[in-house]
């Protein structure tokens, strides 16, 4: 039974990891508490749903959804975040809250609050080992999540733009002096963050066979935050580790304690966590200068 | 002379960087002590460790013989210390008067009754504090600006206000961190007079400075830091003649 | 004359950091900029490299006005700025830092140039795959200078390369600067270490509170009492 | 100076008198009801202003504290049959205590963590309200909460309640204003503007942050309690994160740091949905757009001091990047 929960936790955790990675890429670069992360990518997921119901091939629909997530985040950054980029902490955060509400209510206006089936026609079979059931779907999810993570890591490590992103996250002026086009690169980061979110979101929909408004904020942004609290805000490695731990924690809580209070208990655990380890497991070292 | 502050083997390392290494120094009552050294010599770090903002890696800090190593900043401040900052740190959205009143934080004890049941600013303690702050502002020539938002003041006045705020807590020791940064020679001359005047009122003053005219002109005693270590200590004349100091500033004379 | 500023004024909010500043750099010369803290030296470099926008005045480089351009445009034109305070990118390796220096280049010679610097500074080669944040101060400074050179600049702006370095390391860094100068790069050097700077410079400007108070060839400045006074209070 | 202060007092008294006389003009029950709700929400907006505007702590979970006050009061009054004023006052104390505890947990946390935790706390409270059926009655909520009653006098009409709510607002406003203008308020503002300089002025930052959070929560809890006794129904769906965000916008619209601004912002956001059905339908979208547009072009709100928003920038500047640079 424990092993079963571990496996379930791992697959849901790896979905959270994708979402949290997208979130933390943006956070790492601008330290913006991005309230809108989930709601932006939810638009991408719903766009994919829209295309699916119109009979578009699932692969194309998902691709289109990812592109929508990319493009929307690109524009949101340019129109809403860039003007307040250097306005401290409160102002951009509130801007992000605003964006979240615009996006969420746009979805509500178009699709409404109902839960829709999200059927891409892939129904995995179940593999059984002893008493443990592993869905092939779970394996696919794990594979996709892992390959996305590897892809992003390679992108950051090996490409020029990737290195530019890492440079910007350390110091915008220094990166600018190297010739990194700051505005364009930050746009790209936002775009990637949105696209990663859509991938995570769609996997989520496939996993649960359904899609509803909550995949944005309640199941997206909040989980990304939780993962960041555990792992350390702004660290990619922390985000992935935190997300997987979160997945396991949730799976354990709903398996052994209570499904009803799952969210509440997880939050309480997190608050306790913050009390004990306020900077997360993989803190970014910052020395304040005065 | 009484030693107000004494450090023993004070060291602060950041990762592998030894910002301070085994510094032993004293601040004596009613002196003006200058602290000089090239950029990165550890002057500001010294201030930060003495005031509790950083925990020292090693060593101890004593105030009047009482150890305060590891105490929080506000409790160290409570021992009779106030400071200004290299990059001015005012409460930008508050009025000039309120900035100084915040400086008096530890002196005003209005009590809950006065806070909740008297008209704002009409309590006895509040009126006394206000009067004291206004006379302080007057001393600095800022009384006309009392109701302005401090963020809108010109640079020179900001510097003065920061000193006024520090003095409002009636400290025994006033630490000034590069007070003349960004000032022109006239303003610097004015500042020298001001520091001298403050010292004559009985305050002990510690000044970190790059401006040698200022430091040599007003200090009674100078401590020189380089690479986190104290390399010299003495009166201005002795420091000016000290070979290691000249080297630290102008670079070694090639032979 | 490869580069000049005319009547450059820069303000930070209400503070005027530079006031009607005009300087000229001759091709291949090493010019040094001296002055106390807060005199505006760093501000001038930041304005040239595009990090700050001037309120007034112009900057001319090879006959073109470049004031107000974004930093990535300016470095592409051949002006590299090596900022103060050893701004290595601490979470990237030495190799990655050097590669970042060549961000604007698309030619195939990048790897060769990195190897060239490694050969020239074996200390960096030894630390090739270490994070730059783990290097000592002197090594970081060396790295930052090399990184700036990786863009193959025509003009190199150096901001206090000796800041906070041990005397021996300072000597080493100045030796590097001298070599770069000899190879024909135009250099604008900001320094607190006045004597050392003047020794390797061709020309020096002295700044006080945003204004130029003296300009002369380096040898005459070195002999002048004024320099000594402005630094040690005479 | 004296003149201005005297005038201000006159204006305040005149405004209160006018508010007292207003029911002579407005006799419509519906309008009175809207005004009553406005008075109560004003206190919530004021408490948000005290926390976000004066102390720079971005609290996004105010509705949870309203809910705590409301449920406490409702349970005490309905199940345990306590008189109104006991339920009401202890609701404030309860919310304040929870606020103090939460503030204490976050006392060392950075800006981000505090914001996250207030959101998380809101989620936790909602789940508890909804699922702790033996106590909160779950999704059904707690109906038949008694109307406020003092010594046999029941505030059982909209008109009667009008004066109770108005009195409540006036008292809270005066208290909050006095706090903001005392040593306490100055300490809050000092922490907001520059916490390092504040600690060097002898302010114990952690304690004052906890205190700020606790005081704000007392007022929120009281407002929650009064509202639940007015509507006579505690519903778990009234204390969501959306509600918190809507309340936050009340304080932002009027201007963070301006107490009269909080009243104006609340008035607009309480009345607008009542006037226009479509505003109600799209209210969260409007709030979204308002937040974005205001933050970019108008960060100091309607009544904020000129330029305050611009300097809100100073609250917590990014330390690792210099804004003058590269930001252009």
Image (tube, coloured by chain):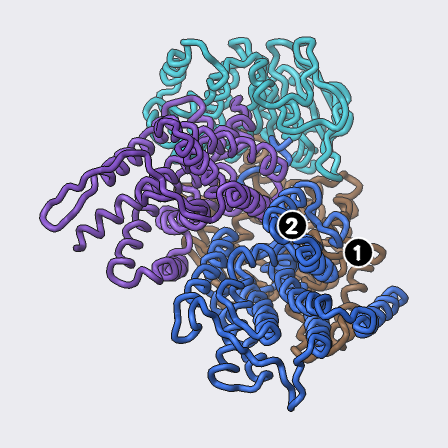
Q: Secondary structure at mark 1?
A: loop
Does residue A104 appear in this view? yes
On the picture, is A131 further left or further right than A249?
left
Asked if B32 appears above or below C143 in the picture, the reply is: below
What is the chain identity of the residue bearing mark 2?
A: D
Residue found at x 35% / y 62%: A261
Q: Which residue is mark 1?
A: B140
**What quarter of the picture does the N terminus of chain C occupy?**
top right
Asked if B150 appears above or below C195 in the picture, the reply is: below
Residue found at x 75% / y 57%: B95
In the image shown, does B229 or A110 lie closer to the viewer?
Answer: A110
Q: Which residue is mark 2?
A: D278
> Which chain is depicted blue?
D
On the picture, is D158 further left or further right than D52?
right
Q: Secondary structure at mark 2?
A: helix
> Which chain is depicted purple?
A
Chain C's colour is: cyan
In the image shown, does B75 or A193 lie closer to the viewer?
Answer: A193
On the picture, is A86 further left or further right than A9?
right
**Label 2 crowd (10 A; few <14 / some 14-19 / many >=20):** few
Task: Give the spatial CA distance, label 1 vs label 2.
Answer: 58 Å
What is the chain identity of the residue bearing mark 1?
A: B
- Name the spot of residue B27 as percent of width and height, x first: 58, 58
On the picture, is B42 further left or further right than B141?
left
Does residue A220 appear in this view? no
> Which chain is depicted brown?
B
The reply to the same-chain question for discs 1 and 2 is no
């Amino acid at each position: 039974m424990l092993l079963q929960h571990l496996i379930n936790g791992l697959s849901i955790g790896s979905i959270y990891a994708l979402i949290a990675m997208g979130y933390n890429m943006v956070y790492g670069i601008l330290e913006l508490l991005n309230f809108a992360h989930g709601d932006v990518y939810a638009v991408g997921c719903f766009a994919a749903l829209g295309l699916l119901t119109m009979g578009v091939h699932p692969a194309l629909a998902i691709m289109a959804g990812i592109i929508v997530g990319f493009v929307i985040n690109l524009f949101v950054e340019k129109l809403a975040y860039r003007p307040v980029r250097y306005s401290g902490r409160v102002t951009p955060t509130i801007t992000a809250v605003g964006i979240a509400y615009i996006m969420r209510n746009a979805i509500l206006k178009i699709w409404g609050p109902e839960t829709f089936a999200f059927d891409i026609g892939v129904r995995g079979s179940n593999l059984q080992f002893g008493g443990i059931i592993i869905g092939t779907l779970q394996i696919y999810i794990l594979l996709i999540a892992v390959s996305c993570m590897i892809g992003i890591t390679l992108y950051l490590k090996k490409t020029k733009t990737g290195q530019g992103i890492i440079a910007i996250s350390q110091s915008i002026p220094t990166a600018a002096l190297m010739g990194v086009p700051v505005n364009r690169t930050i746009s790209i980061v936002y775009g990637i963050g949105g696209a990663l979110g859509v991938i995570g979101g769609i996997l989520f929909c496939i996993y649960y066979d359904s899609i509803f408004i909550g995949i944005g904020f309640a199941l997206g942004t909040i989980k990304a935050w939780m993962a960041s609290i555990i792992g350390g805000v702004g660290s990619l490695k922390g985000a992935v580790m935190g997300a997987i731990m979160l997945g396991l924690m949730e799976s354990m809580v709903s398996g052994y304690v209570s499904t009803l209070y799952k969210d509440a208990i997880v939050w309480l655990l997190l608050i306790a966590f913050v009390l004990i380890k306020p900077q997360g497991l993989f803190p970014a070292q910052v020395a304040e200068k005065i | 002379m009484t030693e107000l502050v004494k450090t023993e083997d004070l060291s602060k390392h950041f990762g592998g960087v030894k910002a301070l290494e085994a510094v032993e120094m004293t601040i004596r009552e009613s002196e003006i002590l200058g602290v000089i050294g090239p950029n990165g010599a550890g002057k500001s770090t010294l201030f930060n460790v003495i005031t509790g903002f950083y925990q020292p890696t090693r060593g101890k800090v004593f105030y009047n013989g009482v150890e305060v190593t590891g105490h929080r900043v506000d409790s160290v401040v409570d021992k009779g210390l106030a400071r200004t900052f290299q990059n001015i740190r005012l409460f930008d959205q508050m009025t000039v008067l309120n900035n100084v009143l915040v400086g008096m934080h530890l002196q005003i004890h209005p009590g809950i009754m006065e806070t909740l049941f008297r008209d704002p600013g009409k309590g006895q303690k509040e009126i006394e504090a206000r009067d004291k702050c206004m006379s302080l502002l007057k001393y600095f020539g800022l009384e006309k600006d009392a109701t302005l938002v401090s963020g809108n003041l010109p640079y020179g006045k900001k510097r003065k206000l920061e000193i006024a705020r520090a003095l409002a807590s009636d400290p025994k020791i006033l630490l000034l961190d590069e007070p003349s940064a960004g000032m022109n020679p006239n303003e610097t001359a004015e500042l020298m007079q001001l520091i001298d005047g403050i010292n004559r009122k009985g305050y002990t003053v510690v000044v970190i400075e790059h401006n040698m005219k200022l430091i040599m002109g007003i200090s009674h005693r100078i401590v020189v830091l380089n690479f986190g270590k104290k390399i010299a200590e003495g009166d201005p004349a002795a420091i000016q003649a000290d070979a290691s100091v000249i080297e630290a500033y102008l670079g070694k004379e090639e032979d | 004359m490869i580069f000049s500023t005319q009547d450059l004024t820069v303000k930070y909010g209400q503070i005027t950091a530079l006031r009607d500043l005009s300087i000229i750099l001759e091709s291949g010369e090493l010019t040094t900029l001296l002055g106390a803290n807060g005199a505006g030296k760093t501000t001038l470099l930041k304005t040239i490299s595009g990090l700050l926008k001037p309120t007034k005045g112009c900057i001319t480089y090879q006959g073109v006005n470049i004031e107000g351009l974004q930093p990535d445009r300016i470095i592409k034109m051949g002006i590299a700025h090596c900022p103060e305070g050893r701004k290595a990118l601490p979470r990237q390796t030495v190799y990655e830092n050097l590669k970042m220096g060549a961000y604007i280049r698309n030619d195939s010679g990048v790897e060769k140039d990195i190897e060239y610097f490694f050969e020239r500074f074996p200390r960096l080669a030894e630390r090739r795959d270490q994070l730059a944040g783990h290097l000592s101060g002197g090594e970081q400074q060396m790295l930052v200078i090399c990184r700036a050179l990786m863009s193959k600049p025509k003009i190199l702006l150096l901001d206090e390369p000796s800041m906070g370095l041990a005397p021996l390391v300072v000597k080493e860094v100045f030796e590097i600067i001298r070599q770069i100068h000899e190879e024909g790069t135009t250099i604008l050097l900001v320094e607190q270490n006045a004597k050392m700077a003047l020794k390797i410079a061709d020309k020096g400007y002295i700044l006080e509170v945003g204004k130029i108070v003296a300009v002369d060839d380096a040898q005459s400045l070195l002999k002048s009492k004024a320099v000594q006074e402005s630094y040690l209070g005479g | 100076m004296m003149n201005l202060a005297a005038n201000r007092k006159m204006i305040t008294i005149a405004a209160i008198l006018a508010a007292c006389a207003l029911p002579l003009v407005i006799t419509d029950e519906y309008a009175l009801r809207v005004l009553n709700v406005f008075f109560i929400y004003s206190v919530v907006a004021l408490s948000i202003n005290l926390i976000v505007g004066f102390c720079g702590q971005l609290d996004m979970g105010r509705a949870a504290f309203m809910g705590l006050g409301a449920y406490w009061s409702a349970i005490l009054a309905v199940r345990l049959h306590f008189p109104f004023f006991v339920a009401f006052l202890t609701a404030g104390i309860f919310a304040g205590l929870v606020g103090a505890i939460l503030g204490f947990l976050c006392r060392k946390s950075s800006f981000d963590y505090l914001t996250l935790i207030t959101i998380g706390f809101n989620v936790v409270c909602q789940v508890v309200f909804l699922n702790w059926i033996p106590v909160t009655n779950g999704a059904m909520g707690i109906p038949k909460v008694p109307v406020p009653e003092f010594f046999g006098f029941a505030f059982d009409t909209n008109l009667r309640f009008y004066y109770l709510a108005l009195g409540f607002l006036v008292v809270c406003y005066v208290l909050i204003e006095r706090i903001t203008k005392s040593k306490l308020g100055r300490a809050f503002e000092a922490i907001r503007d520059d916490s390092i300089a504040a600690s060097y002025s002898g302010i114990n930052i952690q304690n004052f942050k906890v205190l700020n959070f606790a005081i704000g929560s007392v007022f929120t809890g009281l407002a929650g309690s009064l509202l639940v006794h007015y509507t006579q129904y505690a519903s778990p769906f009234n204390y969501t994160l959306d509600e918190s965000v809507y309340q936050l916008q009340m304080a932002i619209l009027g201007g963070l740091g301006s107490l009269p601004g909080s009243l104006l912002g609340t008035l607009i956001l309480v009345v607008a949905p009542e006037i226009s059905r479509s505003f109600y339908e799209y209210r969260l979208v409007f709030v979204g757009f308002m937040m974005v547009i205001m933050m970019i072009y108008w960060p100091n709100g309607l009544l904020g001091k000129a330029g305050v928003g611009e300097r809100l920038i100073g609250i917590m500047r990014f330390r690792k990047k210099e804004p003058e640079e590269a930001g252009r």
